[in-house]
Structures are given as structure tokens and as C-alpha cells.
Amino acid sequence: MWKTNEGSTGRLIQLSIGYFFFYVITGVTVKYFTGSADAGFPGMKQVEYLVYSTIGGNAIALSVALGLRWYHIKSNKIITFMGVSFPQEILYIIPSGICTAVVIPTTTMMYLLPISVMVAMVIMRASIIIISRLVDEIQIRKGILKKSLYPEENYAVVFALIAAAMNLIWVAPGDFDFVHSVPAVTILGSYIVVYAIRIYIMNYYKNTRAKGVALDNNGFFAIEQITATIAMLSAGYVLFNSPEWFRTTNEQLIIFQQSIANPHPQWGMGVLAGTAFGMVAFFSVFIFMFKGRTATFAGLVNRLTSLVAGTAATIVSYFLFQGKFPKMQDWISLGFIFIAVWFLSRAEKKRMHEMVQAKEL
């Protein structure tokens, strides 16, 4: 039942199930750990939880990548610079890892805004769907992507964007006005820019494998995670040791430093909770780089799965932690998501037939 072939629909479903499961946990734990201490929750400050969960998530991803030695990537070509030989792919996977170092904290920061998990996910995911479609267009025009997009993939993009528009436009009195919030727009803007670069690099890697060279997604993931770890540790060190005059001008920076110098009593549980986000990283990358699929298709599967997980996380948070119950626009958005999924299922059948005919499976 669980034995599937690389590039098959069954393997794609397995990855989506794993992604859904761990994203629900991620969405719920964010709201739990930052809940009010007066209500019986840990009461962590937002930046505190960001620090602890990032440590946990990065630790689990890095441990697997190093422990299983995934970093021995299968390369198109080995190049030599100053007497050191290394796979040429490292030249662009390292920038992707730096982008990942920005994606990780900005993702969590989006969930920490005063909006439901579902709304945060809809906004982020819709942005990535647009980027994925643009990446395909660019790489098709450059001759990097040899496959064409099916009409169903474009239809799915349209309905996914309608789902996002529901939560950007439908702002009721008292709701968090995302569009006019400078911090929210800044976080989202950073997320979009670095993810655009990262998605382009992942698909460039996937679409430029030489004949006979395996699509080594494990190797890509390992090098990316190693780079992200070094980048985040470096940034954390600089921020923690920032001069006094700079420290006192930024309240969030002070909280960041205190979260390390004087950790929250439940910091260990926060780190443990962050491992769920680390598990999400595996499924996310492997879906984005799924064999034989366009960036548009893979991006839609990735993003729509997390959107459905957002609905589940919001409902769980409501019943367990007195969180916000999904509003009418959230349910309507979910309906559009299911329509997009239906179009994707039709595109997947066509793609599988195409790959079988081309003997790619």
C-alpha cells in the first residue's frame, strides 16, 4: 500500500498527507504557545516562540540531512576552484539556502499576526502560486522547461487566486486589516521575494538534470539546509551581540536577546513543537521538486494542501484553545480551493499518461 514509485501519483499523495499532518500541528502549536498565560497557555511572546520553534525545526531537518549524508549530491558536473572540487549545483543551491533562512522566520511571523491561521496561509500560498506560474513562463521561454502547461493547471491557478482574494478584500469591522498594516506587508514582501528566487532555483535544478543524472532532491535539500543553518546562526549571533544603542531602539530585538539570555520556562517545549515545522520542510521541498511536474502544478499541490491544513488548524484551535472560528469568507475560500484541486486532478491524469508514453515512469 505504501510502496510507490518516484514520480507516481501515489508518491505525490503520500507527500501531501505528510505535509498536511505536520502543518496542522504547526498551525495549532503557534496559537497555543503564544496564548495568554492568564488563560492557562504558556504565554510566550511572539518573538520568543519564533526563536524556539526555529531552533527545533532547523535541528530536525539538519540532523536528518547530516545523519543520512544526503549532502553527497549527484551532480551534472564537478568543477574545481582554487584546488577544491565540488558539484557545480552548489553555486546556486547556496543562494537558495540563504533564501530559506529568510523564509523560515517570516513564515512563523505571518502566523503570529492577529489573524486566523487560515487567513495567513491563504495570503502566503496565493502569492507562491502566482510566483510558480511566472517561473514556468520564464523557464519555458528560456527553453529550460520542456513541458507545456495544461489548461487545467491555469484554471486551478485562477480559482486558487479567487480563494485568496476573499480574505484580502472581505474585511469586516474589527478584523485585522492586513493590506494597511506596515509590519504585515513588510513580512509578506520579504517572504515573496526570497521565495520567488528559491522556487526559480529549485525548478532550474529539476529541469536541467543531464541525461542519466538522477534528480537528487535529498542532496538539494541537505545543501540548502546546511546553508540556511549557517545563515541563521550568523544573523542570530550578530543580532544577539548588537550594540547597546541599537538594542534599545528595537523592542523586538530586546525580546529576541532575552529569549536566549533568560529563556522562557517552557522553552524546551517550544523547541520540541518546532520540530513539526522542520518535518514540514521535507514534504514542502519534495513536493515543489516533484519529478515530471511543472512549477505551477507542484506549487498548487503544495500550497493548496497547506490551505486545507489551515482550515483544520483553525478549527482545532477554536475547540481546544478558544481561538477564532473560520468566518464565512474562509469557508467560501475553501470551496474555491476544492474546485482548484478538481482541476489539478484532471491535469495529473494527463501528466501521468504523458510520462508513461515518454517512459519517464
Image: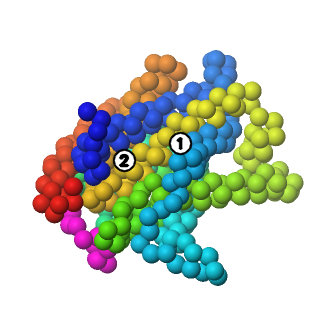
Vertical relation: 300 (above or below) 329: below
Q: Mark 1 highlights which residue?
A: 278
Q: Kindly indicate the quadrant of the structure image that contains residue 261.
A: top right
Q: Nearer the viewer, residue 88 or 25?
A: 88
| Mark toward the start of the polypeptide (1 vs 2) | 1
Q: Is residue 150 visible?
A: no
Is residue 311 found inside the magenta-colored segment of the image?
no
Q: Nearer the viewer, residue 359 or 319?
A: 359
Q: Position of residue 107 (x, y in %)?
A: 53, 47
- Disc 2 crowd rating (10 Å Cα; few below 14, some 14-19, many 20+) is many
Q: What is the distance, in whole Å, between disc 1 and disc 2 at their CAs? A: 17 Å
Q: Amino acid at mark 1?
A: Gly
Q: Mark 2 highlights which residue?
A: 303
Q: Is residue 12 visible?
A: yes
Chief secondary structure of the magenta span?
Answer: loop
Q: Quadrant of the C terminus?
A: bottom left
Vertical relation: 128 (above or below) 310: below
Left or right? Give the position of 80 relative to 22. right
Vertical relation: 338 (above or below) 90: above
The span shown in magenta is: 138-152
